[in-house]
């Protein structure tokens, strides 16, 4: 019991601080690295406001185009399910909100535990489904790298360990909670150096796409067909 | 400089080092943000007709960017530099570029569907355009495109069409119609550009312009020093060549002092002169650029485009990618078609998310790509089939050629028309008298 208590104290203390430092510093480095590259001003005469096009694309890209939804419904539906359930599991679980409140001094209302529990299960199932799909789909199997599988594992572990900790599946609980926090730390540490960065850079990517392509769009109309 | 880049004999000067430098020059904040955001979801494959029609996962758009991605990761990220220092990075080699050349040139028409589909917003086709800069500088561009670019710089046209060829076509049209085709009219309001494909294969386009502009009493001209609008530099991916070709047009327009330059129907010509041009020459134009359909739509709104008859045959409209999806000229084609035909049957995904004819982005100039191009035309064939029509209307000379070849390949006997020509064929029949305006102008010189 003492050993697991020591372990829990270590992961909650020094290990957490180190992980958080790498997470924050890593993200800052990555974002600055991108911004410092800059981009040339577009000298062609814009047809419509590029700022509005940028904002529009940041928002609109969350809605799949109807043709692609028909062609690849699995990726899109499971993708949605995954992101929503992950968000609920992480940001709307009361103990998590308390940790965030302790760290940043901000908080918001959470959801009932049973609800979050269900979301976590759906998140895990959708992750597993996507892994199986990745193994089997010719395109996904072809373009997947070791990083994709590493990121999958490191994203899955916090959910699994969190689920076990919440249900006290194993004893001692301190060890279980410690493992959960450790898995989150692993997630934080690899975040800035892998495709997990998309959480941040998706906003930049959509923005740049929007301003460069959207300035050619007709004003006030989106004729689709 | 430009001649050096493409002259066949100077191939030794195109080497890996130059290629790597060209890749480096293309890395900017958007590229870095795009690569950082890719989660390998694979949706771009479903947007690409080269994948959907072949099922070959190598044609997944994001996979086509491997060379550019490696340069970015290994040289522009801290983590990548560390991996490279520790010997974990796979370098960009001639072998890699050779392997990727058919993916980047034969299996991408720069149609831009992937850039519209990508959920994280990556402008993948824009990055393929960038990747081609490194490919051509390293000597890994297809022969067909190298030849076209060489001819474009040397003779002024990718198809080797020189001024006498245009003059001959003009003489024919003038003899047939009695109209005058104005050329080098100083101070004209509009300067029309053509594509080689139009001069050689579809001279009716020139006649159509003359008819419509005469009726509208438009003060227009062609320019003997800058009549070619197609830009092989954009297709092969050489900014040097592209810049030289754009500069010719700009010099011609400035010399004549025109207010507006008219892009022909041709989609890549439009992209070149309208969107890439000012960035290639590094300054804004002192004139406006409009696509021919934008101009026709303006003339229609001003009551200067008057048609007198309509066709009832069933047609479908093929949207050229560079004009519609990437150029934003979207409502005009349909509005204009209504003038001459009221039996339009749209294809699935028509409009912004249309499917490419398969021959854009230099694919049609690259003989090696022909079997693949005809194979992936299956998508267009199916679309046209499902529209169940008697004819296809489009507004790009290259699309038109590709549609004709593709339909023939799949044994579909169906005519393909140019929208501008269709409109010219249905003008109100009082076009004789305004042509005097142009004659007068020429007399004044």
Image (cartoon, rainbow, N blue to C red):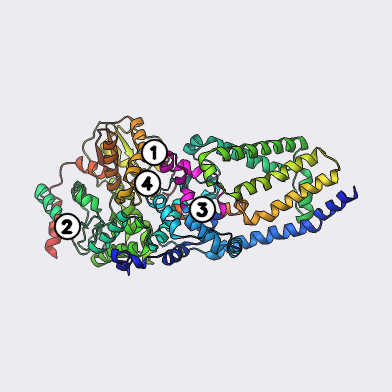
Q: Is residue B302 visible?
A: no
Name which residue lies at 81% across and 53% down.
A12
**The disc numbered 1 marks a residue on which chain?**
B
Classed neighbour count for the residue bearing mark 3: other residues with Cα under 10 Å, few (<14), some (14–19), many (≥20): many
**The disc numbered 3 marks a residue on which chain?**
A
Reading the image, the residue beneath label 1 is: B350
Reading the image, the residue beneath label 4 is: B321
Reading the image, the residue beneath label 2 is: B182
Q: Nearer the viewer, residue B363 or A149?
A: A149
Q: Nearer the viewer, residue B97 or A77?
A: B97
Give the x, y percent position of residue A180.
77, 46
Marks 2 and 4, Cα distance to the nearest angstrom?
A: 31 Å
Classed neighbour count for the residue bearing mark 4: other residues with Cα under 10 Å, few (<14), some (14–19), many (≥20): many
Marks 2 and 3, Cα distance to the nearest angstrom?
A: 43 Å
Quadrant housing the N terminus of chain B: bottom left
Disc 1 element? loop
Range of magenta residues: B36-64
Q: Are marks 1 and 3 on the same chain?
A: no
Q: Nearer the viewer, residue A119 or B153?
A: B153
Q: For the residues carrying marks 1 and 2, which lies nearer the camera in this image?
A: 1
Marks 4 and 3, Cα distance to the nearest angstrom?
A: 21 Å
Height in image: A110 above or below B443? above
Query: Dividing the picture into quarters, in which one does residue B437 lie?
Result: bottom left
Q: Seen in the image, is B329 located left or right of residue B434?
A: right
Disc 2 element? loop
Reading the image, the residue beneath label 3 is: A54
User: Along the polypeptide, which appears first: circle 4 or circle 1?
Assistant: 4
């Amino acid at each position: 019991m003492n050993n697991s208590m020591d372990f829990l104290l270590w992961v909650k203390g020094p290990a957490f601080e180190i992980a958080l430092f790498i997470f924050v510093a890593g993200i800052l480095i990555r974002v600055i690295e991108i911004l410092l590259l800059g981009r040339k001003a577009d000298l062609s005469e814009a047809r419509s406001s590029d700022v509005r096009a940028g904002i529009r694309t940041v928002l609109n890209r969350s809605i799949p185009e109807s043709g692609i939804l028909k062609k690849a419904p699995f990726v899109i539906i499971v993708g949605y399910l995954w992101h929503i359930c992950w968000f609920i599991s992480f940001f709307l679980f009361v103990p998590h909100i308390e940790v965030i409140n302790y760290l940043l001094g901000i908080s918001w209302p959470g959801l009932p535990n049973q609800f979050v529990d269900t979301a976590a299960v759906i998140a895990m199932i959708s992750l597993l489904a996507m892994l199986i799909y990745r193994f089997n789909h010719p395109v996904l199997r072809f373009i997947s790298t070791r990083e994709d599988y590493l990121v999958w594992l490191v994203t899955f572990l916090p959910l699994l360990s969190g689920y076990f900790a919440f249900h006290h599946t194993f004893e001692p609980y301190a060890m279980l909670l410690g493992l959960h926090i450790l898995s989150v730390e692993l997630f934080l540490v690899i975040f800035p150096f892998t495709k997990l960065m998309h959480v941040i850079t998706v906003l930049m990517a959509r923005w740049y796409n929007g301003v460069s392509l959207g300035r050619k769009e007709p004003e006030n109309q989106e004729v689709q067909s | 400089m430009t001649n050096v880049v493409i002259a066949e004999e100077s191939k030794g000067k195109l080497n890996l080092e130059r290629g790597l430098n060209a890749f480096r020059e293309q890395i900017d904040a958007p590229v870095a943000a795009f690569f950082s955001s890719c989660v390998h979801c694979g949706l771009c494959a479903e947007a690409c007709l080269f994948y959907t029609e072949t099922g070959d996962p190598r044609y997944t758009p994001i996979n086509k960017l491997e060379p550019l991605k490696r340069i970015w990761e290994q040289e522009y990220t801290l983590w990548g530099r560390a991996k490279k220092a520790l010997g974990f990075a796979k370098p960009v080699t001639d072998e890699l570029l050779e392997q990727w050349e058919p993916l980047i040139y034969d299996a991408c028409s720069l149609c831009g569907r992937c850039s519209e589909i990508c959920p994280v917003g990556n402008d993948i086709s824009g990055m393929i355009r960038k990747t081609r800069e490194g490919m051509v500088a390293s000597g890994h561009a297809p022969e067909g495109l190298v030849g076209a670019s060489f001819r474009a710089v040397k003779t002024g046209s990718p198809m080797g069409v020189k001024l006498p060829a245009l003059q001959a076509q003009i003489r024919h049209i003038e003899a047939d119609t009695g109209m005058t085709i104005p050329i080098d009219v100083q101070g004209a309001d509009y300067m029309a550009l053509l594509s080689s494909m139009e001069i050689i294969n579809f001279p009716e386009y020139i006649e159509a312009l003359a008819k419509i502009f005469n009726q509208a009493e438009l003060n227009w001209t062609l320019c003997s020093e800058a009549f070619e609008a197609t830009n092989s530099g954009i297709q092969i991916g050489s900014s040097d060549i592209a810049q030289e070709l754009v500069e010719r047009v700009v010099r011609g327009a400035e010399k004549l002092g025109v207010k507006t330059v008219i892009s022909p129907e041709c989609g890549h010509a439009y992209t070149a002169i309208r969107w890439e041009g000012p960035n290639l020459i590094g300054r804004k134009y002192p004139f406006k650029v409009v696509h021919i359909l934008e101009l026709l739509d303006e003339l229609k709104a001003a009551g200067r485009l008057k048609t007198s008859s309509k066709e009832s045959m069933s047609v479908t409209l093929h949207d050229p990618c560079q004009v519609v999806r990437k150029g934003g000229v979207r409502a005009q084609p349909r509005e204009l078609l209504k003038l001459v035909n009221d039996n339009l049957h749209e294809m699935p995904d028509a409009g912004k998310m249309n499917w490419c004819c398969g021959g854009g982005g230099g694919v049609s100039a690259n003989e090696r790509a022909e079997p693949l191009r005809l194979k992936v035309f299956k998508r267009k064939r199916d679309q046209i089939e499902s529209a169940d029509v008697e004819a296809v209307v489009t507004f790009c000379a290259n699309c038109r050629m590709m549609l004709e070849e593709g339909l023939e390949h799949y044994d579909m006997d169906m005519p393909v028309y140019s929208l501008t020509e269709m409109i010219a064929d249905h003008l109100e029949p009082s076009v004789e008298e305004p042509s005097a305006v142009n004659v007068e102008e020429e007399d004044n010189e």
